Amino acid sequence: MRVIIFLLVLSLSACGFHLRGHNLQGNSFPFGSLYLKSAGATPFIADLRNSLELYKIKLSPTAVEADLTLDIVSEGTDKQILALSGAGQVLEYQLRYRVSLRAYDKQMQDWVPADEIQLQRTLAYDASQILAKEQEEALIFRDMRSDAVQQVLRRLSRAKPRPDPAAQLEAAEKAESTVKSVPASKSGTTK
């Protein structure tokens, strides 16, 4: 029996299987340290902080000491009625989770421009199972929070300095003027 379990574990590890959030190989971030700026301590911020530490990103206590500042501008949840029965009782809710963020360096140059992560799920509701549905709602919000943390990490792993649009326009105009000043070569042969 031990041999079968050992072979099963060996085959799973050989195929690249890993638990979610535990694949640290090949994930490098283009910055050394990060300052996490937020309005307050929320479960999302705690989960994000834990995940950043898991990926061995140095969290700086101030923005001055960090290579990059991740500003969590806002975070919110919303619950709306999606369907009603003929008797006017709720049948389904739509649950929404939203996180607004931006990442920039010491020179205030955007690495991740202002963006919003929006997630939504549907919750079937049954008034005869109120306690169970409240627990299911909390579980769905926790799952959406975890998904949002993973999306933030993916965006940070692909982050890079974004050039200023005015500087891009200036560089394009300079390149265009250089092309116009180069004389065109004559084609054809002379005899």
Image: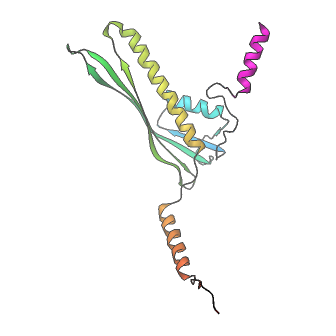
Question: What x and y, as percent, mark residue 49?
Answer: 58, 32
Quadrant of the image containing the C terminus: bottom right
**In-image side of 124 versus 163 (left or right):** left
**Residue occupying the point 39% across, 9% down:** 131
Q: Quadrant of residue 128?
A: top left
**Residue occupying the point 40% across, 32% down:** 76
Question: What x and y, as percent, mark residue 57?
Answer: 65, 38
**Residue occupying the point 57% across, 39% down:** 154
How was the colour assigned to the protein in this rendering?
rainbow
Q: Quadrant of residue 10?
A: top right
- Which residue is the extreme one toward the bottom? 191
Bounds of the magenta span?
A: 1-17
| 39 in relation to 93, above or below | below
- Which residue is the extreme one toward the left? 87
Q: Which sits in the foreground, 95 or 51?
A: 95
Quadrant of the image containing the N terminus: top right
| 168 in relation to 7, above or below | below
- Figure label count: 0
Question: What x and y, as percent, mark residue 62?
Answer: 59, 43
Q: Which sits in the foreground, 152 or 84?
A: 84
| 79 in relation to 156, above or below | above
Q: Which sits in the foreground, 93 or 46?
A: 93
**Residue occupying the point 24% across, 14% down:** 89
| 68 in relation to 169, above or below | above
Q: Is residue 136 magenta?
A: no
Q: Which sits in the foreground, 134 or 190?
A: 190
